[in-house]
Image (spheres, rainbow, N blue to C red):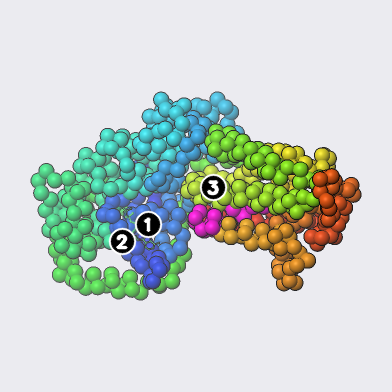
Amino acid sequence: MTPQGTAENRDIEFENIFLTVKSITAYKKIIRGVSGKFKSGELTAIMGPSGAGKTSLLNILTGYQKSGIQGIIKCSNERGKKRKKASSDYRNYSCYILQDDHLLDYFTVYEIMYYTTKLKIGGLSREENDFLIDDILSTLGLIKQKRTPCGSLSGGQKKRLSIALELIDDPPIMFLDEPTTGLDSNSSRQCIEMLKSLAQKGRTIICTIHQPSAPLYMTFDHVYIMAQGKCIYQGLPQNTISFLASAGYICPQYHNPADFLMEVANGEYGDSVDILSLAKESCLCKVENVLQYDQNSNETWKRDSCHPSSFYTNYSTISASEGNFIKEQKDKEKDMSIEPAIITREILLEDPECCIRKKPSEWTRFLVLFQKQLIYFYRDWTVARIKLILHFLVGIFLGVTFQNSGYNASKFITNLSFFMVSVVYLSYTALMPAALRFPSELKILRKEHFNRWYKLRTYYASFLAADFPLQILFTLAYTIGSYTISSQPLEIRRFLMVFLIHSMATLVSAGIGTMFGTIVNPVNGTFLGAILTAVNICFGGFLCLFPQMNNVMYYLSNLSYMRFCMESILQAIYGFNRGKLICPEEEEYCMFTNPNEVLHEIGMDECSYWTDFGWLIVNLLVFRLLGYCALKYKVK
Ligand SMILES: Nc1ncnc2c1ncn2[C@@H]1O[C@H](COP(=O)(O)OP(=O)(O)OP(=O)(O)O)[C@@H](O)[C@H]1O
């Protein structure tokens, strides 16, 4: 139940990892044949100058980066009983805490922990759930902030909360990208000490870090130093200075070894990367050779054998052939296929089921996510309340503007304008927020989905289930005022038919917004959405009447959801045996008093309300499906 001490021991070993990415003009090698081993029970720091490839390596090890990789990653448990598994299984035992903390500001620490526990672990009672939450929050020193909204937490507290969320299902392997970035030295120390205590309980913890202070550097059990996509040192932090000295780089007295290492890696003492990576290679070779003779060797011995004094001798003998070695390495890199290959992952697992807590069903997750969405809508007053009030006020405003147009035969053109304006208003106000919403939530979604909190389709279904009623509520707020004040026929049936089509216009355009906003960036998403809406308006059958459209445009108008909206609304208003329109006494002449003549004049007399409604349903399904596909593509 508790997070402490229950993690399965798993080591991570990787060999000859290469990463090639395609930039705009050419292929670029980011990681150049790195190997290493990160042991369970240890806190490992991946360090190096900016651009060294730390995050790229972490992305490869976590499975976040999937293309352009070559090499082997092995994950084994304590006893190392071999068992092959697919790469997705490897991820089942790890979590990845990204550099930025993507948290929902409107939830308190307890609430976010509560819902995440519900998403990750099935079958817990409320008491068990609360016990687990308190235990984790106490471990991470967040118990006092239990009722604090996430948006009000400090940077360090947010980082700890991100870790706490991933500790809920007690992953044996944890990856953290720069957990101390943005923290002051005291918070950085607390964070690293907390990670170290978690590692001591058997977890494999790997993090990237930028230039730690000297005491912090010595806190790590293992450091892995990178420069220019290569590993230049791996081992105990305490051995760094003597390792560098053996390679000819003498650390000045009282100088932070981590700083000195970075200076060397940055080339401040000449081109050192190849020399150091060669030095490190020879050190490792020596360790491996000796290990072959002594299978019972323990870890301390292994590290000692990597001590520079023993290494130095070895390095001297190899340095004569240094040029050849470096050339060999470069040739090896050239030989690597430019076309990215998929990485081979070999998983060595004892019993994969034993360390996984019971997962909740997707239905349970759906309910939890649905509840979360509703709370979010309720708490962010800009999402629901302000929109509801504005829709109501705008409905009244437009109703007054188009007053009496509903029954007045002399104002039938004005009445057509009223419905066109209504459909356009509802479309724009649904499309724009939808185009902006997912891009802003994509990072949270990506993190949670990557760490297996839920399936994407579960999230999407819960979003739709919470969003649809809200959109329909907004539409109702608009329709009530505008319909009655503009004097449309006061018949429940006709009102409901218009309301239904207004709702469809809202839901279809929100689907278009989601699709565009997800595929391209928010700026382009709103731009494309605005263009599509403008084209749709032209095909609505009012600005350009269908009888006056050429054949090609008329058939193209079948692609416009606004055409179906206008046809069905005008059928609901003027069709279904409506009585004659009133021609006021002050008017000398009314062209049409018969509603059928109005429909005939605009070429909509042969339309069917329910057929048009059916086409709107098709539009809705198509755009929502495309929105889901776009989201899936972006998240993956
Ligand atoms: N998709 C990509 N296309 C082109 N270059 C890339 C791509 N991804 C990473 N790089 C380059 O690879 C190098 C390593 O990037 P990475 O983010 O791994 O570095 P880092 O060591 O984590 O740096 P920092 O400490 O600044 O975060 C950088 O020079 C970066 O510009």
**Residue 368 seen in this snapshot:** no
Q: Where does the magenta region start and end? A: 507-527
For marks 2 and 3, the one nearer the N-term is 2
Quarter occupied by residue 615: bottom right
For marks 1 and 2, the one nearer the N-term is 1
**Residue annotated with mark 1:** 56
Expressed as whole percent of the image width and height from the top left, the position of residue 88 reads 51, 54
**Residue annotated with mark 3:** 437
| Kind of residue at disc 1 | Ser
| Kind of residue at disc 3 | Arg
Expressed as whole percent of the image width and height from the top left, the position of residue 462 reads 62, 43
For marks 1 and 3, the one nearer the N-term is 1
**Residue annotated with mark 2:** 229
Kindly indicate whether the residue at mark 2 contacts the one at mark 1 (C-beta within 8 angstroms): yes
> Is residue 185 shown left or right of residue 125?
left
User: Is residue 516 inside the magenta stretch?
Assistant: yes
The span from disc 2 to disc 3 (Cα, nearest Å) is 36 Å
